[in-house]
Each structure stands twice: as structure tokens, then as C-alpha cells.
Image: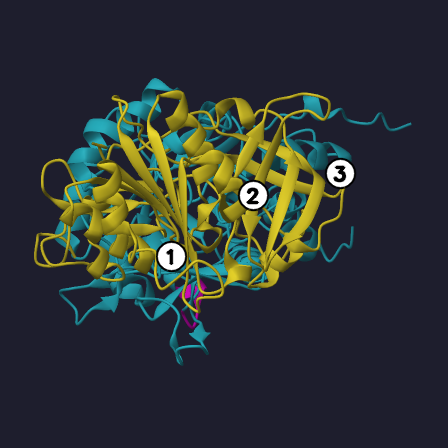
Chain colours: A yellow, B cyan
Amino acid sequence: MVSTEAMVGRGAVQVDGEVLSNKRVGVYHHLTLVADGIAERTKPGNFVALSVGGATSAHLLRRAFSIYRVRPAGVYGGTVEVVFAAHGPGTQWLADRQPHDAVNVVGPLGRPFALPKEPVACALVGGGYGSAPLFALAEKLRERSCGAHMVLGAATESRLFGALEAKRAAQSVTVTTEDGSVGIKGLVTDPLPGLIARHSIDVVYSCGPMGMLSAVTRVATAHGAWSQTAVEESMACGIGVCMTCVLPVIGDDGVTKMVRSCVEGPVFAGDKVRWDDIGTIPAGTFGAPGMGGH
Amino acid sequence: MVVALRPADVDLVTELADASLANPVMTASGCAASGQELQQFFDVAELGAVVTKSIMRDARSGRATPRMAETPSGMLNSIGLQGPGINAFLARDLPWLLQHDARPIVSIAGSSLGEYAELARRVGNTPGVAAIEVNISCPNVEDRGLVFACDPVQAGRVLSVVRRDTARGVPVFAKLSPDVTSIVDIARSVVEAGADGLVLINTLLGLDIDLATMRPRLGGVTGGLSGPAIRPVALRAVWQVANALPGIPLIGVGGIRTGVDALEFLVAGASAVQVGTAIFNDPHAPVRVLAELRTELAAHGFARARDAVGFANRSAARGVLV
């Protein structure tokens, strides 16, 4: 469904963005930046890499975020929106930005979600703020007359993102929380088999923590559906030069390669990712020790 | 009355042994892949040279993740020289650089003298290669895994075979590790063995611990420290080697983020500079540093970049404070 050829030089831009708004949503932050040139190039599943701390920052590495929403130039110029959790000094700096503050933006980056050519039914599964890129995806799917059924899950209600918006974006919405504070008590994978069967779903899109993506892929594959997963690997550059965000993915030739999630991904066919081997170099990987490499 | 220099009038040409470059700013190895990824931000032909990621004979998967940890004003990396090997590089990456009018400096890395020799024969005789940079911060499989760069004799042997097997007219630069007792001793050894110039410095070995797991953060346990955190170490290495081996072309690298940083390296004795980790922060960093360097040279009254090279060393030698 998706080749592993890198999306090199697709025309990302680097612009000085300006904060338009920065709002709390549950435990998350919803940041809207005026950043010209991003919206026109963005497809659902693309991400932006934001610098943190200003031009002399001691935090050199960009923070990568899935694009939640874009609006082409209007009254304010083009905007790009991201949703994130403040879990370190870099994301906390972003959480503290006020309107008119500057944030440097590189994007859009990465390989977007592959869209079905036929009007098939799709499930869109988001864990926590991993749901962010799924709303624009649902819109694109509806334009193609594809059914869009959302499953949003989180540990607890305050960690869900976009449950209300999902009702507008999708034909059906299923919510799960691990503590049962809202929706079905359990994991996103609990209602998924029933949903796939009920709506004859052909493609399962997912975005969220690696463990969730792995489990969603397992369910999708077991029920004969394609899976498209947007992975979350830590990155230093986001543009394909640093080689830090790699994971083992099976190529079209059947050979496992360590591929960059920033340019070959972040969206991968879920059944091609060797989920259980992330964090290792699996035996037989292209260039692995004992394969003529090292 | 002194007429102020205009930045546009500064002559940026720099000479590195047999290579003449349009300007002294390059990418640093391992921070720009083989150039393609940066072309969407700026034209790689604008740089003095593009230094490639280190090329090895065989394909390599690199090390397990996590491969990176952010540290104050820098980062640790433990990539493990992931790459497709020399055949793919010569078939795909080098032609791309030449088609885009870049000046490629090809970084080579090996795990034995034989591998270095083979890489030198193949890369060092390919038309269009501006120079070879020899990454000697690799374990020597024929000598208990000791790193070539840490032993003057082994480092000299590598440079000797690479110089021997590289076409005449293609300069060979040795990239030295700062993790040694005396970088001047290593520098002297590789220059005597035939290196035409030196690249100072490679990363420093570092460690980060994750208190959530109580284990080292990197999959490879230790990693190479880069970024502005190491800039004074790099500048010191350039200064010491420039004083000890006058006339040997030096390329400064380590934490350069601005044109001011670049000019500091020039006046400490470097004929060129490489921009590395700063690219992760700012993909335009190499061309921004170049533009800023031009401005700084003009502001300090240098009509030619090469007049700035070693200016501080000469001033110190004369005992003149400027």
C-alpha cells in the first residue's frame, strides 16, 4: 500500500511563526500559529517541527507534532495548529507561549496518510492527543465518500482530545477510557473488532502511543483490514538528516530496514512495522551485524 | 579615514591544500546526510562544500534506538554509522551532489586498514570529489577494537594508506577525536603519514542516564556529544594544532551556530568551518552562518576570509593585543 521510498525534498518550508492562540484543552495544549506556506502544502498525517526556547536556546532539538488543523491565508495569514502535552522543558516552553510570541516552524514534514481509491469504510483510532491528525483525515475521507468511524481512547476523560469534534467529523464515534470515566471502560482495541464487522471496515487509521498502534494493527490485520499507523519516535531534526528516529520496517522487497520515521514515515502500513522489535536491530535487518555490516 | 568594508565585497575564497573553495562554510559529516534533504531549504551549491555522512564499505543498520539524547546546549548521538554502503553511495548520492553543482567532500570510515584503502581507491578516484575526510573514530577490528583516532601509530597508518590510494590532487583530511591526551601528537602523526589537512574535532564521548529506568538513556550506552556545548573544546584544539603545525590547513568543527562562532574558528587558525548539530535546530544554519560570517569579516575589517585565518595566533606570537 505504501512504499518505503523516502519523501525527500518534498518542499517543506522554514518560517518564523507567530502565536495566534494557546489554549488548555483538558490536560493538553492547543497551539495555533500564524505560519505562511504551511497550510497549502499540508496533507493529513504530516507533522511540523517546532524550535523551542528562541534563537539562543540551550534546547537545540526541534519538537515534532502531528498537524491538527491548517487554514490557508485569510485575515491572519495561513495558520497551523498542534495539540501537545507539556511533559518536558521544551513542551513546557511552548505551553507558556502567549499571543504574538515567535515560534520557528519547519513543515509540513513526513509522509501523510495514504487515502483509499475506492469509497470504502474506514476506522480512525486515536489515543490521547494522538487523535489530533484524524479530524482532517476524516474530512478528506468524507470528500471521497468513504465512511469515517472514530474510536477515541485515553486513560481518563481529561486525556481525551476532540470527542465533541469527532461527532461532527465522523459518522460514528466510540469513546473508551481505561478508568471508565466516560464511554466504554477499557482500551480502543476492545470495541474495534465489533466496529470493523458492523461497518465492513477496510482501512484502520491510527495515531497514538506505539503500544496502541501495535495492538490496533493486530486487530485490523486479524479482521482483514489494512492499517495505516502514524508513529511517534523521538526525533532530533525531523527532516531526514540525523538518523535518530529509525524503526525496523519490512520493505516491499521483504527485507527489514531501519527506516527514518520522519521521511519514510511517520505513517506506515501497520503490518510492515516490526512493533515487537522496536528498540532493537532484529536479526536479518539490512546491514545488521552478521549480515556483512559492522 | 577608514572606508568601511561592505559585506558584499569580502572575498570568501579559501584554500585547503589542493582544493580551492568558493567560501569556508561546509556541512559537518553526519548532520546533512548526503545533501538531498537540505536542498528544499537552500541550494547546496551555495556552500563551500558538502561533507557527506561517513561512508563505509558495507551496508550498516546502525545501533538500536534510542539513538539520541538532548543535553544542555548539545546532544548525544549513538547512530552507529547507519548507511547503505559504498556501492549505493557512488551510484546514487554522489551523482546527485555533482548534478546539483555541490562540492562534495566524502567522509569515509572503515574498521580495518584494508577497508580504508578500498574506500580511498574507489572514492578518491571518482571525478568530482573535492576532498576526502577520513573518519578515524572507529574501532579497529584488527586491534582489539581500539579506536584508530586514539593511537598516533594506528591513526598514522590509516592516513598513510588513504593518501597512498587516493588520486593526486584530491586532498585527504583526517578528522581527529578530542578524546585523547594530546591532540597535537595525533595531528603530527597523521600529517607525517600524509594527511594534507585536519578536521578538528569529532564528538566527545558522553553519557546520559534516565532516572525513570535507572539506565543509560542511549541504546548504545555512550554517545558522541556535539553542539555549542563543545565549541570551546573545538576552538582550543584548532588553536593548539595551528600553533604546533603552522601551514597545515585546518577545518574547524564543533558547536558552530553563528557567523561570530565561525569567525572565532578562522582567527584561531581554521581555513574553513563545518556546521553540524546547528542544522537540527535550523535547517538553514549553513547558509545563515555563511551570510553572518561575511558580515562579521567586513565588520572586523577583513577584505579576504584568508586574511582572518590564524590572525589570533599571529597576534599572540607577536605579543600584540588587538
Q: Secondary structure at mark 3?
A: loop
Q: Label 3 lies in what chain?
A: B
In the rendered image, residue B292, in percent from the top left (x then y), is placed at: 66, 35
Q: Nearer the viewer, mark 2 or mark 3?
A: 2
Give the label on residue B300, or none. Answer: 3
* Residues packed near mark 2 inside 10 Å, few (<14), some (14 to 19) or many (20 plus): many
Quarter of the rendering occupied by the C terminus of chain A: bottom left
Q: CA distance from mark 2 to mark 3?
A: 44 Å
Q: Secondary structure at mark 2?
A: strand
In the rendered image, residue A236, in percent from the top left (x then y), is placed at: 45, 51
Q: Is residue B32 above or below residue A193?
A: above
Q: Label 2 lies in what chain?
A: A
Q: Label 1 lies in what chain?
A: A
State yes or no: residue B226 in magenta.
no
Residue beneath label 2, please?
A: A82
For the residue pair B137 and B284, the one nearer the viewer reads as B284
> Horizontally, is B46 left or right of A259 in the view?
right
Amino acid identity at mark 2: Val
Contact between marks 1 and 3 (CB within 8 A): the answer is no
Amino acid identity at mark 3: His
Q: Tell me which corner region of the image, top left, top right, bottom left or bottom right, holds residue B118.
A: top left
Contact between marks 1 and 2 (CB within 8 A): the answer is no
Amino acid identity at mark 1: Pro
What are the residue bounds of the magenta stretch? Answer: B180-185
